[in-house]
Image: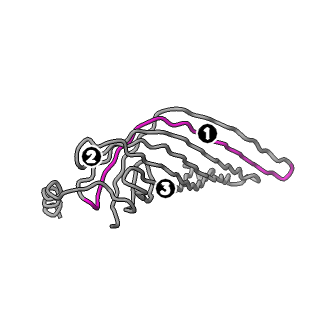
Amino acid sequence: MTRAFLVLALLLPGIPAAAQQSGQAGLAVGAPGSIGIIWHVSDAIAIRPDFSFSHTHSEGTSSVVTTDSWGAGFGASALFYTGKIHDNVRTYLTPRFGYARTNASTRLSGAVTNPEQHQNSYSYSGAFGIQFTPTRRFSVYGEAGLQYSTVDSTYKSAGPITLSEGKTTNSQFGSRAGVGIVWYFN
Protein backbone atom coordinates (compact mmCIF):
# COMPACT_ATOMS: atom_id res chain seq x y z
CA MET A 1 0.00 0.00 0.00
CA THR A 2 2.82 2.41 0.89
CA ARG A 3 4.60 1.62 -2.38
CA ALA A 4 1.46 2.51 -4.35
CA PHE A 5 1.36 5.94 -2.69
CA LEU A 6 5.06 6.47 -3.34
CA VAL A 7 4.67 5.57 -7.04
CA LEU A 8 1.62 7.85 -7.30
CA ALA A 9 3.48 10.72 -5.62
CA LEU A 10 6.39 10.33 -8.05
CA LEU A 11 4.19 10.13 -11.14
CA LEU A 12 1.74 12.96 -10.38
CA PRO A 13 4.17 15.85 -10.98
CA GLY A 14 5.05 14.41 -14.40
CA ILE A 15 1.44 14.34 -15.66
CA PRO A 16 0.53 17.58 -17.39
CA ALA A 17 -2.38 19.49 -15.89
CA ALA A 18 -4.70 21.96 -17.53
CA ALA A 19 -7.12 24.53 -16.22
CA GLN A 20 -10.60 23.25 -15.61
CA GLN A 21 -12.72 23.43 -18.71
CA SER A 22 -16.20 24.82 -19.04
CA GLY A 23 -18.73 22.19 -17.95
CA GLN A 24 -16.24 20.15 -15.92
CA ALA A 25 -17.66 18.93 -12.58
CA GLY A 26 -16.33 17.09 -9.57
CA LEU A 27 -16.82 15.99 -5.99
CA ALA A 28 -15.47 18.55 -3.48
CA VAL A 29 -14.68 17.53 0.10
CA GLY A 30 -13.71 20.38 2.39
CA ALA A 31 -12.69 21.00 5.97
CA PRO A 32 -14.27 22.00 8.19
CA GLY A 33 -16.85 19.30 7.41
CA SER A 34 -18.52 19.83 4.04
CA ILE A 35 -19.23 17.67 1.01
CA GLY A 36 -20.29 19.17 -2.29
CA ILE A 37 -20.04 19.47 -6.02
CA ILE A 38 -17.99 21.94 -8.04
CA TRP A 39 -19.12 22.89 -11.53
CA HIS A 40 -17.03 25.10 -13.83
CA VAL A 41 -19.50 27.36 -15.63
CA SER A 42 -16.62 28.78 -17.68
CA ASP A 43 -12.84 28.94 -17.48
CA ALA A 44 -13.17 31.95 -15.14
CA ILE A 45 -16.21 31.04 -12.97
CA ALA A 46 -17.19 27.97 -10.92
CA ILE A 47 -20.09 27.21 -8.58
CA ARG A 48 -19.58 25.05 -5.48
CA PRO A 49 -22.72 24.06 -3.50
CA ASP A 50 -22.09 21.94 -0.39
CA PHE A 51 -23.88 20.33 2.54
CA SER A 52 -22.99 19.19 6.04
CA PHE A 53 -24.64 17.23 8.84
CA SER A 54 -24.01 16.36 12.48
CA HIS A 55 -25.37 14.35 15.40
CA THR A 56 -24.35 14.72 19.02
CA HIS A 57 -25.40 12.51 21.91
CA SER A 58 -24.35 13.31 25.47
CA GLU A 59 -25.16 11.65 28.75
CA GLY A 60 -24.29 12.68 32.30
CA THR A 61 -22.32 10.33 34.55
CA SER A 62 -25.37 9.74 36.69
CA SER A 63 -27.58 9.28 33.57
CA VAL A 64 -29.91 12.02 34.86
CA VAL A 65 -29.50 14.23 31.77
CA THR A 66 -29.43 12.97 28.17
CA THR A 67 -29.17 15.32 25.19
CA ASP A 68 -29.51 14.55 21.49
CA SER A 69 -28.75 17.12 18.81
CA TRP A 70 -29.20 16.83 15.05
CA GLY A 71 -27.96 19.37 12.53
CA ALA A 72 -27.93 19.86 8.76
CA GLY A 73 -26.71 22.69 6.61
CA PHE A 74 -26.04 23.79 3.07
CA GLY A 75 -23.91 26.46 1.46
CA ALA A 76 -23.14 27.90 -1.92
CA SER A 77 -19.92 29.48 -3.15
CA ALA A 78 -19.08 31.19 -6.43
CA LEU A 79 -15.43 31.04 -7.46
CA PHE A 80 -14.14 33.87 -9.63
CA TYR A 81 -10.68 32.92 -10.92
CA THR A 82 -8.38 35.95 -10.92
CA GLY A 83 -5.08 34.70 -12.27
CA LYS A 84 -2.43 32.02 -12.68
CA ILE A 85 0.65 31.77 -10.50
CA HIS A 86 1.92 28.79 -12.49
CA ASP A 87 0.48 26.49 -15.18
CA ASN A 88 -1.42 24.44 -12.60
CA VAL A 89 -1.86 26.99 -9.75
CA ARG A 90 -4.71 29.49 -9.91
CA THR A 91 -6.04 32.13 -7.53
CA TYR A 92 -9.69 33.03 -6.99
CA LEU A 93 -12.08 35.17 -4.96
CA THR A 94 -15.15 33.49 -3.48
CA PRO A 95 -18.27 34.89 -1.84
CA ARG A 96 -20.26 32.29 0.13
CA PHE A 97 -23.66 31.94 1.78
CA GLY A 98 -24.42 29.21 4.34
CA TYR A 99 -27.47 28.05 6.30
CA ALA A 100 -27.67 25.44 9.07
CA ARG A 101 -30.52 24.13 11.24
CA THR A 102 -29.94 22.35 14.56
CA ASN A 103 -32.55 20.71 16.78
CA ALA A 104 -31.70 19.57 20.31
CA SER A 105 -33.79 17.80 22.90
CA THR A 106 -32.89 17.11 26.51
CA ARG A 107 -34.36 14.34 28.64
CA LEU A 108 -34.24 14.72 32.40
CA SER A 109 -34.99 11.43 34.16
CA GLY A 110 -37.90 11.82 36.56
CA ALA A 111 -38.76 15.30 35.23
CA VAL A 112 -42.10 16.21 33.74
CA THR A 113 -40.57 18.73 31.30
CA ASN A 114 -38.16 17.93 28.49
CA PRO A 115 -36.69 21.13 27.02
CA GLU A 116 -36.15 21.53 23.26
CA GLN A 117 -33.97 23.99 21.40
CA HIS A 118 -33.87 24.95 17.70
CA GLN A 119 -31.18 27.03 15.99
CA ASN A 120 -31.08 28.65 12.56
CA SER A 121 -27.63 29.87 11.50
CA TYR A 122 -26.90 32.15 8.54
CA SER A 123 -23.37 32.97 7.37
CA TYR A 124 -22.02 35.35 4.74
CA SER A 125 -18.35 35.34 3.83
CA GLY A 126 -15.76 36.35 1.31
CA ALA A 127 -12.36 34.72 0.84
CA PHE A 128 -9.23 34.58 -1.28
CA GLY A 129 -8.26 31.10 -2.47
CA ILE A 130 -5.52 29.17 -4.23
CA GLN A 131 -6.17 25.98 -6.21
CA PHE A 132 -3.43 23.53 -7.23
CA THR A 133 -4.31 21.06 -9.99
CA PRO A 134 -1.53 18.49 -10.46
CA THR A 135 -3.69 16.36 -12.82
CA ARG A 136 -6.85 16.87 -14.86
CA ARG A 137 -8.93 14.80 -12.40
CA PHE A 138 -7.59 16.01 -9.03
CA SER A 139 -6.99 19.35 -7.28
CA VAL A 140 -6.50 20.77 -3.80
CA TYR A 141 -7.48 24.20 -2.56
CA GLY A 142 -7.13 26.49 0.41
CA GLU A 143 -8.95 29.72 1.18
CA ALA A 144 -9.02 32.38 3.88
CA GLY A 145 -11.18 35.43 4.44
CA LEU A 146 -13.81 37.12 6.60
CA GLN A 147 -17.24 35.91 7.74
CA TYR A 148 -20.34 37.40 9.36
CA SER A 149 -22.88 35.04 10.91
CA THR A 150 -26.11 35.20 12.89
CA VAL A 151 -27.71 32.48 15.00
CA ASP A 152 -31.39 32.57 16.00
CA SER A 153 -32.16 30.19 18.89
CA THR A 154 -35.55 29.30 20.30
CA TYR A 155 -36.17 27.11 23.30
CA LYS A 156 -39.29 25.60 24.78
CA SER A 157 -39.97 23.69 27.96
CA ALA A 158 -43.51 22.55 28.71
CA GLY A 159 -44.71 21.35 32.10
CA PRO A 160 -48.08 20.25 33.36
CA ILE A 161 -48.94 23.80 34.46
CA THR A 162 -46.35 26.17 32.95
CA LEU A 163 -44.88 26.80 29.52
CA SER A 164 -41.45 28.41 29.27
CA GLU A 165 -40.12 29.60 25.94
CA GLY A 166 -37.75 32.21 24.63
CA LYS A 167 -35.61 33.40 21.76
CA THR A 168 -32.05 34.70 21.48
CA THR A 169 -30.15 36.13 18.53
CA ASN A 170 -26.35 36.18 18.34
CA SER A 171 -24.10 37.64 15.67
CA GLN A 172 -20.41 37.15 15.06
CA PHE A 173 -17.77 38.65 12.77
CA GLY A 174 -14.37 37.05 12.30
CA SER A 175 -11.98 35.12 10.14
CA ARG A 176 -12.84 32.08 8.04
CA ALA A 177 -10.52 29.47 6.52
CA GLY A 178 -10.95 26.18 4.73
CA VAL A 179 -9.09 23.55 2.74
CA GLY A 180 -10.33 20.82 0.47
CA ILE A 181 -9.78 18.37 -2.35
CA VAL A 182 -11.67 17.84 -5.61
CA TRP A 183 -12.01 14.68 -7.71
CA TYR A 184 -13.25 15.59 -11.21
CA PHE A 185 -15.70 13.30 -12.97
CA ASN A 186 -14.61 14.06 -16.54
Q: Position of residue 14 (x, y in %)?
A: 14, 56
Q: Looking at the image, is mark 1 or mark 3 earlier in the sequence?
A: 3
The local secondary structure at tag 2 comes to: strand
Given the image, on which type of amino acid does mark 3 rest? Pro
Which corner quadrant holds the C terminus?
bottom left
User: Magenta stretch: residue 157 in it?
Assistant: yes
- Residue at the (79%, 51%) spot, across then down: 158
Q: Which numbered disc covers residue 37? A: none
> What colour scheme has been applied to the protein in the rendered image?
one colour
Name the foreground residue: 170 vs 63: 170
Disc 2: CA contacts within 10 A as few (<14), some (14-19) or many (>=20): some
Which circle, 1 or 3, is nearer the viewer? 3
Mark 1 in CB contact with mark 3 (< 8 angstroms): no
Check disc 2 and report the residue beneath it. Answer: 89
Name the foreground residue: 19 vs 118: 19
Q: Looking at the image, is mark 2 or mark 3 earlier in the sequence?
A: 3
Instruction: Please state the extent of the stretch shown in magenta in the rendering.
Output: 136-161
Q: Is residue 48 left or right of residue 17?
A: right
Name the foreground residue: 37 vs 70: 37
- Residue at the (29%, 54%) spot, across then down: 19
Q: Is residue 3 left or right of residue 36?
A: left
Q: Name the quadrant containing residue 137.
A: bottom left
The local secondary structure at tag 1 comes to: strand
Check disc 1 and report the residue beneath it. Answer: 150
Q: Position of residue 77 (x, y in %)?
A: 48, 49
Q: Magenta region's main secondary structure?
A: strand
Q: Residue furthest top?
A: 173
